Image: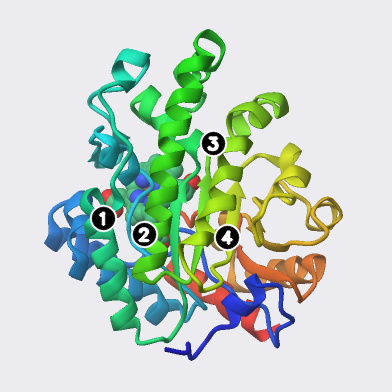
Amino acid sequence: MTLQNDLLLRTARGELTERVPVWMMRQAGRVLPQYRAVRERAGSFITLAKTPELAAEVTIQPVDAFDVDAAIIFSDILVVPEAMGLPYEMIESRGPVFPSTVRSQADLSRLRVADAESDLGYVLDAIKLTKKELNNRVPLIGFAGAPFTIFCYMTEGKGSKTFSVAKKLLYTDPNFAHALLQQITDSTIAYLQAQIRAGVDLVQIFDSWAGILSPEQYRTFSLPYIKQICDLVGSASDRDIPVTVFAKGAFFARHEIGQLSCDVVGLDWNMDPKESRELIPDRVLQGNLDPCVLYADFTQIRAEVKQMLSNFGHQHYIANLGHGIYPDTDPDKARCFVDAVKEM
Ligand code: CP3
């Protein structure tokens, strides 16, 4: 049962380690031609995500291709709304769309708290199969969206630059907003606990749209729900499961995020490493290379990685990008990023 490479786990738990661990957000996906081939075979993103054999295969692809220190289970944050009774579609070159939205108490009354075992059994099966096929090479990361980010998609119905429909509801119907956020939170806690029972070694919460809120709104509509998740997910198992909170754009909330019962705080590239260390003195930090650096030449990528590592320091740190890798990145550049971290 012991992992051959448990570097990421030891670092996430706050231990001192022999080198900086590295993985990439969105490493399993369109950046790899082998992913595109499997997706083609599956026919659609959703079929791929719902077929445990294929999900396990694409989860392991980046471990083989990039030699990263962790795998992240192939799925999407939007499986939670679907499990609550709000199905989504994934439209090629447009992204996710919800044919119906939730904008009132009446809409909410048609949803339920997700039952992880029955509604999300396909993700749990994919986790069990991936753990088996990984054969203890590296840890497996589970994940979920933060309640506010999920709220954005469920109310807006699709991606948006401003999410003004979602934000409007925070002002016009805060009671409804809190009720929906609580139902998402309850579903997410059950889901992450089930992922842990299925075998994931650590979990990450993605608050991808945190940056559209004011500090005050963030304290009201996002942080309390992430706090509930951090306080409760660990109790699912006797194993020590580190929790990472990645709130993109929430530079203003770094100190408060660092006081949650999480182990790792993820940073995007707008957040200065040294300033972040001061604001978050006693947590492991993860991040934060601009994914666009991977469009630069190999020499420049190595120089940027070197600078990043010297800014963060080599302990209590997990190297990553500051957000998901872009699909048109050259896989050799991604490999260069990983190798550069390992060589320093
Ligand atoms: O390697 C991994 O990170 C594992 C898989 C993963 C996916 N989505 C697969 C995916 C993870 C961790 C996610 C998280 C996710 N999904 C987030 C949070 C992280 C972030 O990027 O901020 C968000 C906001 C979503 C919602 C989502 N899913 C959007 C907005 C899109 C469309 C944009 C895009 O990248 O295409 C997706 C689709 C999606 N999720 C794809 C993949 C591989 C591409 C779909 C395809 O293959 O056709």
Say whether disc 2 or disc 4 marks the residue closer to the N-terminus. 2
Is 241 in front, or is 158? 241
Disc 3 packing (10 Å; few <14; some 14–19; many ≥20): many
* Residue 341 in view (yes/no): yes
Q: Mark 3 points at which residue?
A: 209
Residue type indicated by callout 2 = Ala
Mark 1–mark 2 distance (CA, rounded to whole Å): 7 Å
Secondary structure of residue under mark 3:
loop
Distance from mark 3 CB to nearest ligand 1 atom below 8 Å: yes
| 3D distance between C-alphas at marks 2 and 4 | 15 Å
Give the residue pinned by disc 4: 243
Residue beneath the point at 30% across and 21% down: 109
Which tag is nearer the camera, tag 3 or tag 1? 1
Q: Nearer the viewer, mark 2 or mark 4?
A: 2
Can you identify the residue that label 1 sits on? 117
Q: Is there a contact, CB below 8 Å, between mark 3 and mark 1?
A: no
Q: Where is residue 11 in the image (x, y as percent from the top left)?
A: 66, 75
In three-dimensional space, the C-alpha distance between marks 3 and 2, rounded to whole angstroms, equals 25 Å
